[in-house]
């Protein structure tokens, strides 16, 4: 089995997903659930809905089963989660029991891009990126940013006033002090550190600033959903969100690199073997593999330890319990025992497949 130092020696760049790796994604899931709840229920009280957000989220996502399913299918953007779940809820005419939504998804059994195409043609909300989709995004952003920040960053007034904003409840997925130790270790080892996230620019920058870890990242390698929107607009190619490889290729090549050249594969492909992607979800894994990069899975996403077999079966290069796996001989929660890391081998894949 490889030791973590041997991992570091193989790469010159590490690209992190944010949610489920550094930041908790719970606030985004709450926003998604509250957006769906608002669309399905007239005359809601925003303050009361905020207080009940945990209960609403559990209902809308069928005790997280819908979220876990969509993540495994490669859905990365929470705007897209909102779009897909609301589309099915409207088609099935449900608002209190979302188990039928989960069952419907299982029966469809489609991957991310197939789902976008299917609901774009047959769903009640039209295509992803349509005017209706954009209105859904704005409602989501009202819940996340709150009235004041929403008006400031989106330059229009919220349609439903009284939202405080879930942005003020952001949390790291692991203790900040430990995140800093990992990032400091990687930077001291001479690696360039970047981000590939489904967050837009401001929402990616905000927690980095709050957690005081922005100094560890190369600004030229911080790729957000804002970059994806701009690239889709400039090239006419859609969708470029994960699981498309664009996000991590852009992170490897830098923000100034031509989007057209990335899409046309006009770049030095030898650099992909020197880039490691760290993520918690199927979309991250698929995106990294499509880019030709190694992938380190962390088990701090929504499925937790349950996702381990998924990552083994689908070709993850390494699996960490969390990002502490980068630290040789250190597990910061277990008195120095190094039980937070493993390299995936054929034996592990055979064992995982036998448990299916």
Image (spheres, rainbow, N blue to C red):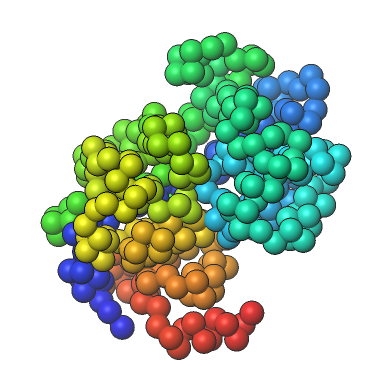
Percent position of residue 191, x then y: 18, 56
Q: Is residue 289 left or right of residue 80?
A: left
Q: Quadrant of the C terminus?
A: bottom right
Query: Is residue 352 depicted above or below 200 in this figure?
Result: below
Q: Position of residue 301 (x, y in %)?
A: 51, 56
**In x, y percent, where is residue 75?**
56, 51
Q: Residue at x 76, y 36 (%)?
A: 124
Is residue 124 shown above or below 196?
A: above
Would you say residue 40 is visible in this rendering?
yes
Front residue of 227 and 64: 227
The residue located at (52%, 87%) in the rendering is 350
Q: Quadrant of residue 199?
A: top left
Residue at the far right in the pictured view: 93
Q: Quadrant of residue 139?
A: top right
- Residue 328 appears in view: no
Going 81% across and 22% down the picture, which residue do you hit? Answer: 42
């Amino acid at each position: 089995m490889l030791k973590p130092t041997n991992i570091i020696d193989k790469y010159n760049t590490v690209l992190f997903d944010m949610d489920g790796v550094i930041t908790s994604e719970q606030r985004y899931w709450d926003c998604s659930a509250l957006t769906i709840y608002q669309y399905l229920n007239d005359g809601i009280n925003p303050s009361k809905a905020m207080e009940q957000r945990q209960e609403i989220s559990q209902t809308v996502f069928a005790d997280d089963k819908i979220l876990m399913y969509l993540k495994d299918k490669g859905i990365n953007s929470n705007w897209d989660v909102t779009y897909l779940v609301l589309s099915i809820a409207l088609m099935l005419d449900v608002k209190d029991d979302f188990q039928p939504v989960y069952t419907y998804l299982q029966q469809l059994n489609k991957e991310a891009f197939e789902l976008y195409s299917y609901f774009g043609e047959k769903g009640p909300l039209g295509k992803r990126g349509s005017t209706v989709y954009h209105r859904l995004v704005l409602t989501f952003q009202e819940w996340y940013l709150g009235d004041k920040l929403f008006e400031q960053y989106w330059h229009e007034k919220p349609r439903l006033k009284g939202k405080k904003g879930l942005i003020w409840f952001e949390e790291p997925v692991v203790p900040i002090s430990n995140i800093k130790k990992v990032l400091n270790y990687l930077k001291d080892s001479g690696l360039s550190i970047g981000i590939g996230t489904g967050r837009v620019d401001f929402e990616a920058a905000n927690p980095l600033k709050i957690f005081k870890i922005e100094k560890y990242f190369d600004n030229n390698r911080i790729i957000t959903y804002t970059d994806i929107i701009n690239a889709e607009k400039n090239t006419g190619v859609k969708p470029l969100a994960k699981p498309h490889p664009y996000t991590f290729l852009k992170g490897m090549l830098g923000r100034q690199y031509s989007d057209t050249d990335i899409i046309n594969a006009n770049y030095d492909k030898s650099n992909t073997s020197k880039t490691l992607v760290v993520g918690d979800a199927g979309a991250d894994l698929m995106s990294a593999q499509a880019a030709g990069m190694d992938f380190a899975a962390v088990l701090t996403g929504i499925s937790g330890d349950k996702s381990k077999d998924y990552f083994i079966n689908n070709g993850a290069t390494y699996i960490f319990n969390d990002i502490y796996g980068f630290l040789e001989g250190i597990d910061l929660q277990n008195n120095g025992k190094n039980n937070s890391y493993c390299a995936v081998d054929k034996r592990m894949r055979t064992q995982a497949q036998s448990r299916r």
